[in-house]
Image (spheres, grey):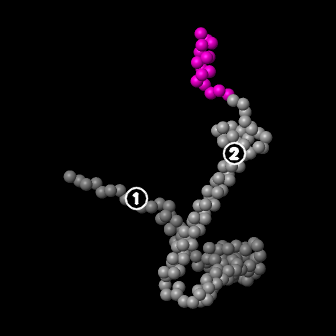
Amino acid sequence: MGSEGNKMNDGTSYQPSEPTLCANGCGFFGSPAMMNLCSKCYNDFQMEEQQKAAAKVALEKLVTSQKKADDAFHVGSPESYGTASEQVERQEEAASAPAAVVKSNRCFCCNKKVGVMGFTCRCGSTFCGLHRYPEKHDCTFDFKGQGRDAIAKANPVVKGDKIQRF
């Protein structure tokens, strides 16, 4: 009776097969669940697929943003009209403007060289160790206003619906 049960199970259960080598030929054994690849080759395959997908998404995003920029440039204000040389000059001027901002390496108050140890305040200036605190350099930044805004964003006002009375 025990042998009959084994015969029935043998017909319905998974038959073990010979182990197959990795499809990449690395010498390790692969499994059918991982497309006959070993675990290392399968992980490499998955990483490559993810990189291809990410590159495709980035390329599509770049193409759509360039289309939007081109449409805005061609349809935009009267400034966008003109000769090609004028348009190129405007683009060069716009590209060179952000490069003009250079971080100062001197204290804004006492003009002392600070080097790498300079402290940049929220008001945008660089200060030495003595003038790094807002009270010491008469900072113009509104710390209270920023705090109020942060609290307002973190805790939105919740109003309940009015109850209708009979």
Decide whether residue 58 is among the magenta residues: no
82 to 160, vertically: above or below? below
Report x, y in % for residue 147: 53, 67
Closer to viewer: mark 1 or mark 2: 2
Mark 1 falls on what kind of element? loop
- Binning the other alpha carbons within 10 Å of mark 2 as few (below 14), some (14 to 19) or many (20 upward) gives some
**Mark 1 — residue?**
158
Residue at (57, 89) in percent of width and height: 83
Residue at (35, 56) in percent of width and height: 160
Which residue is at the front of the view, 36 or 98? 36
- Binning the other alpha carbons within 10 Å of mark 1 as few (below 14), some (14 to 19) or many (20 upward) gives few
Q: Tell me the tag on residue 93.
A: none
Which residue is at the front of the view, 128 or 162? 162
Disc 2 residue type? Tyr
- Indicate which disc, 1 or 2, sits on the residue closer to the N terminus: 2
146 to 90, vertically: above or below? above
Looking at the rendering, the stretch of residues picked out in magenta corresponds to: 1-16
Report x, y in % for residue 156: 45, 61
| Quarter location, residue 28 | top right
Q: Give the alpha-carbon distance from disc 1 to disc 2, as whole Å.
A: 51 Å
Disc 1 residue type? Val
Which residue is at the front of the view, 44 or 102? 44
Report x, y in % for residue 159: 37, 59
Residue at (61, 17) in percent of width and height: 7
Q: Tell me the tag on residue 42.
A: 2
